[in-house]
Image (cartoon, grey):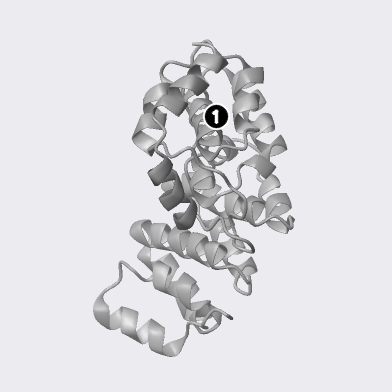
Amino acid sequence: MTLTHLREKLRVQASPARAVATQRFFKTGPGQYGEGDQFLGVSVPKIRALVRETDDLSEKDCLSLLHSKWHEERMLALYIWVRRFERAKKDEALRRRIVRAYLANTRWINNWDLVDTSAPQILGTWLLTHDRKVLQRLASSKSLWDQRIAVVSTQALIREGEFRETLELSRRFLNHPHDLIHKACGWMLREIGKRDLARLRQFLDRHAAKMPRTMLRYAIEKLGARERRSYLSSGGIPRPR
């Protein structure tokens, strides 16, 4: 399928009403985190269904999709990269190219759904066997999305029982001003708790009093009611308005 044909298929499935609702959901208004993002109004399952038809799409065409003003085209580009990365288990060179392209183009991975459906699968999986210094570079970026990529990519490490990077980033972002980073850290802490409850409790015992309320709520979601109440009563700083 050519890039032109692929874009035509997306537009055939577009819904103006869905586009309007999605723009509200992803906070695209002035001053909001997704300011200016534009949507065609295509559902995620329909976007995913197109991925298997893109094997002949060139790397240049994938970048063209990623650089699109349309959110769904950027999402499709990332799904293509995820599929190619996962299928290239024995092709180190291809995986390296995908990771390099991913890191060079994070300015277009610019909403939480785009981050969450690509960072663990691509960058996180790569970091299982490669240097992890890039996480600190991303965390030090002024970009909210680079910071979220750093946090969410560690989900791949958590799945392998490696928690150090997640815990370091969660400590680093205790005073972060944005709710989307609080949610990401809390989500990853909760994932640690599913595998090692003692490590989660250790982190909470040390930091609950300083944690943003949203981060804390996400982190303790799977604990028992009494334990949740105990942590909430001892900490959880409300997010500044």
The answer to which of 117 and 31 lies nearer the viewer is: 31
Please provide percent x and percent y for residue 152: 52, 51
- Relative side of 77 to 43, left or right: right
Q: Where's the C terminus, which quadrant?
A: bottom right
Foreground of the two, 73 or 30: 30
Give left or right: position of 178 versus 26. right
Q: Residue at x 33, y 79 (%)?
A: 228
Q: Residue furthest left?
A: 225
- Reply above or below: 129 against 26: above
Q: Is residue 168 left or right of residue 152?
A: right
Image coords of residue 208 (percent x, y)? 49, 80
Q: Nearer the viewer, residue 19 or 157?
A: 19
> Which residue lies most toward the bottom here?
233
Judge whether 130 appears above or below 192 on screen. Answer: above
Q: As shown in the figure, which amino acid type bears the numbered disc 1?
A: Ala
SS at circle 1: helix
Residue 30 in sight here: yes
Can residue 89 be spotted in the picture? no
The x and y percentages for residue 194 are: 34, 58
Q: Residue at x 61, y 32 (%)?
A: 66
Q: Using the image, determine if residue 26 lies above or below residue 231.
A: above
Q: Is residue 151 above or below residue 159?
A: below
Q: How many marks?
A: 1
Location of residue 98 in the rendering, given as x and y in whole percent from the top left corner: 62, 27
Residue ID for mark 1: 77
